Image (cartoon, grey):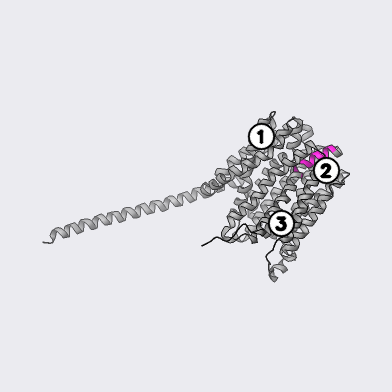
């Protein structure tokens, strides 16, 4: 029987459009702090806020869009998200104050939250059920590639030309995506009356999955560490006179994400979450420590490789743990809860950490975050790890008992067969 087609026109357009959404996000996230510092002479904290406030906008939009997308309609939500994202990105060109920049960043993030929620929802319907895992993997790959190419191109342009060219590149790519999404045939979804009525009542239970909260807190702390690199590694590389190596940081990061994720994913499935989470958090802490000590291009890129292995593993693992810990009928909310806390970490991190940079400098800040990630290992252990170890031990004991019972059963059967053979032999001897 032939597999249903995955690489349809609809799938290609949505995946490409999603790539350009996240390309713009990562390009600006990695470089906007430099723009704010050089153009408006901001403090590190203000520059961090200019970077992180975008994610706050994304978070607010996801709260609302995830709840009302079925009611508004997937197609309308997609078009609204893309046109708002394109328009708010155009507003970067005439920006003339840090206050105006903060407003634009918030609105730009809100627009992306609408657009990315729409693309994620639509692609889940476009992918055939028989190829769900494969299709989702390819779709997620668009984010990984955007996470490397966005910062790389942004840093390359920022170091060689006017920052306005970064905005221009984003506008051109988003305009192309905006035109392309009009050619997507979006499946119609019938909104049930009961669901429609339920959306009129506000309840935190409709937004948050309580059982996913513990691991989401761990995800928040890990995202803080990641945000310190995403936002400030470019400025740090400039101070160290390692601009060329710094522009390749996220390329190395993406390569090691792609290489390590299949292996760590299989280990997670076979050996349990602890076998990957403890080493992965440790590796992120090591990436931050190496970055704090980096004075050569080699050490800077080693930090990128370590971050790819560590954060590439934890970002997918915490999501799997959130799903595992939650009821099956609330899987979507578990994923949403986890993303909310990761977004908060990435969004608040640059602003909070910006206060420490004048005191500790970049080296001190990265060393501090390395210690925070070491502490996160203990947090993970007490919040989830020890419970997961007990569950695994219980499963192993149960499997062991089953095997023992099977062995005992086999021995009884073997003895019965031997007795039967003896009885048959005696009977044959008695027969003349």
Disc 3 marks which residue?
A: 117
Residue drawn where x is 57% and y is 43% of the image: 276
Image position, residue 221 (x, y; %): 68, 43
How many marks can you see?
Answer: 3
Residue drawn where x is 64% and y is 61% of the image: 126
Gap between marks 3 and 2 measured at Cα: 28 Å
Q: Name the N-terminal-most of marks 2 and 1.
A: 2
Residue drawn where x is 68% and y is 43% of the image: 148
Gap between marks 3 and 1 measured at Cα: 33 Å
Start-end of magenta stretch: 28-38
> Which image quadrant for residue 147?
top right
Residue 378, visible in the rendered structure: no
Disc 1 marks which residue?
A: 301
Image position, residue 84 (x, y; %): 80, 56
Q: Residues within 10 Å of mark 3 (few under 14, many from 20)?
A: many
Disc 2 marks which residue?
A: 164
> Which image quadrant for residue 67?
bottom right
């Amino acid at each position: 029987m032939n597999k249903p087609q995955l690489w349809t026109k609809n799938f290609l357009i949505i995946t490409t459009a999603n790539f350009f959404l996240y390309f713009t996000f990562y390009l600006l996230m990695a470089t906007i702090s430099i723009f704010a510092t050089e153009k408006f002479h901001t403090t590190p904290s203000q520059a961090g806020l200019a970077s992180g406030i975008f994610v706050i906008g994304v978070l607010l939009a996801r709260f609302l869009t995830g709840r009302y997308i079925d009611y508004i309609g997937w197609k309308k939500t997609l078009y609204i998200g893309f046109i708002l994202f394109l328009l708010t990105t155009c507003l970067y060109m005439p920006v003339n104050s840090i206050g105006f920049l903060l407003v634009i960043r918030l609105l730009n993030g809100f627009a992306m939250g609408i657009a990315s929620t729409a693309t994620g929802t639509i692609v889940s319907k476009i992918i055939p059920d028989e190829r769900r895992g494969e299709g989702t993997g390819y779709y997620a790959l668009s984010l990984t590639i955007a996470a490397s190419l966005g910062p790389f191109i942004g840093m390359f342009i920022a170091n060689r030309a006017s920052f306005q060219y970064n905005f221009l590149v984003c506008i051109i790519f988003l305009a192309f995506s905006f035109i392309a999404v009009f050619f997507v045939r979006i499946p119609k979804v019938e909104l049930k009356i009961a669901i429609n009525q339920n959306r009129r009542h506000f309840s935190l239970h409709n937004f948050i999955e309580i059982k996913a909260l513990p691991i989401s807190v761990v995800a928040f702390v890990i995202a803080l560490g990641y945000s310190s690199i995403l936002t400030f590694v470019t400025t740090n590389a400039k101070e160290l006179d390692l601009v060329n190596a710094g522009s390749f940081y996220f390329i190395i990061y993406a390569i090691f994400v792609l290489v390590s994720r299949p292996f760590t994913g299989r280990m997670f499935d076979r050996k349990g979450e602890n076998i990957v989470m403890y080493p992965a958090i440790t590796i992120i802490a090591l990436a931050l420590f190496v970055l704090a000590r980096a004075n050569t291009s080699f050490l800077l890129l080693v930090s990128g490789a370590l971050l790819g292995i560590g954060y590439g593993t934890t970002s997918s693992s915490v999501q799997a743990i959130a799903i595992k810990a939650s009821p099956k009928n609330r899987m979507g909310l578990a994923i949403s809860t986890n993303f909310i806390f990761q977004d908060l970490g990435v969004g608040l991190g640059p602003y909070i950490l910006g206060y420490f940079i004048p005191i500790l400098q970049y080296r001190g800040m990265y060393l501090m975050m390395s210690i925070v990630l070491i502490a996160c290992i203990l947090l993970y252990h007490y919040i989830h790890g020890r419970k997961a170890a007990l569950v695994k031990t219980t499963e192993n004991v149960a499997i062991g008992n089953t095997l023992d019972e099977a062995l005992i059963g086999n021995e009884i059967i073997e003895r019965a067969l031997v007795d039967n053979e003896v009885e048959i032999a005696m009977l044959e001897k008695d027969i003349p």
